[in-house]
Amino acid sequence: MTRSSLERIYPDTNDRDHEIGGADTFQLHAARYHYAGKNLVPGPVADIACGAGYGTAIIAAQYPAGVESITAVDNSEEAIGYAQEKYRHPLIRFIQADALTFKAPAPFSTIISLETIEHLAAPEDFVRHLAGQLKKGGRFIASAPITPSMDANPYHLSDFSKNSFKKLFLSNGFRELDSFVQVQRYNPFALFNKKKGGRTGDLRKGLLTYYLRHPGKFFLRLKSVFTDGFANKYLVVIFEKQ
């Protein structure tokens, strides 16, 4: 049975009664897509790691001006199947493929990839690979958590600061055009009250053991709490290929 997880949100099955995994998280995701939709370069668009496809559908339905086509890619067969069933649109083509090996027949004018890069073992390879599929002057609209996430989320392979995230793109032929930060506050006790069958059930088990094995991540979390309180912060940036 399809359900939302820490990796993907399925809007009609979302765990909406929980602050970490509920409607607030969905609204943050949707806001990123609305921001992207307002900043597209006319031409073909890609949505890389599109998940269940609701964000791709926002672009197609609400920001179609100048969009020739939208290629939406995700490595999950289930997510792509869901997207093809729920979000059919003449502008959209949903494709099951790995982002690091996917190759389009022609370059895109805009690439959107939101909350993707933190899941990758080699994020710079990802940026470099997709930069090669973007037109000169095209835009890469990307986002990532800029507060620690690897400790609570076992699917995250990298932690980023605002500077380290931007550096990945700036060192690969991009310049920054615009950005904004989203803040999502959370109750720390919710980390120990994981709801079975919901998104929070996927939070890391054995967190104390994880900190013992990775003390640097514990001190990174402490620094974040002292600086930002109990809040997750997400950076969304528009980069232009030079």
Image: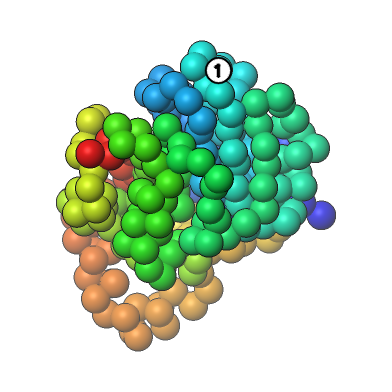
* Viewer-nearest residue: 114 or 124: 124
- The answer to whether residue 70 is left or right of residue 34 is right
Residue at 37 percent of width and 37 percent of height: 135
* Viewer-nearest residue: 130 or 136: 136
Question: Badge 1: how crowded within 10 Å, few (<14), some, or many (20+)?
Answer: some
Q: Residue furthest bottom?
A: 213
Residue at 31 percent of width and 81 percent of height: 214
* Viewer-nearest residue: 58 or 196: 58
Quadrant for the C terminus, please.
top left
Q: Position of residue 65 (x, y in %)?
A: 51, 14
Image: 119 above or below 138: below
Residue 145 in view here: yes
* Viewer-nearest residue: 88 or 101: 101
Residue at 31 percent of width and 36 percent of height: 136
Q: Position of residue 241 (x, y in %)?
A: 28, 39
- The answer to whether residue 223 is left or right of residue 221 is left
Quadrant for the N terminus, please.
bottom right
Q: How many marks?
A: 1
Tell me which corner region of the image, top left, top right, bottom left or bottom right, holds residue 92: top right
Q: Position of residue 41 (x, y in %)?
A: 39, 24
Report which residue position mark 1 lands on. Answer: 64
Q: Position of residue 117 (x, y in %)?
A: 40, 56
Tell me which corner region of the image, top left, top right, bottom left or bottom right, holds residue 181: top left
- The answer to whether residue 131 is left or right of residue 228 is right
Mark 1 residue element: loop
Residue 30 in view here: no
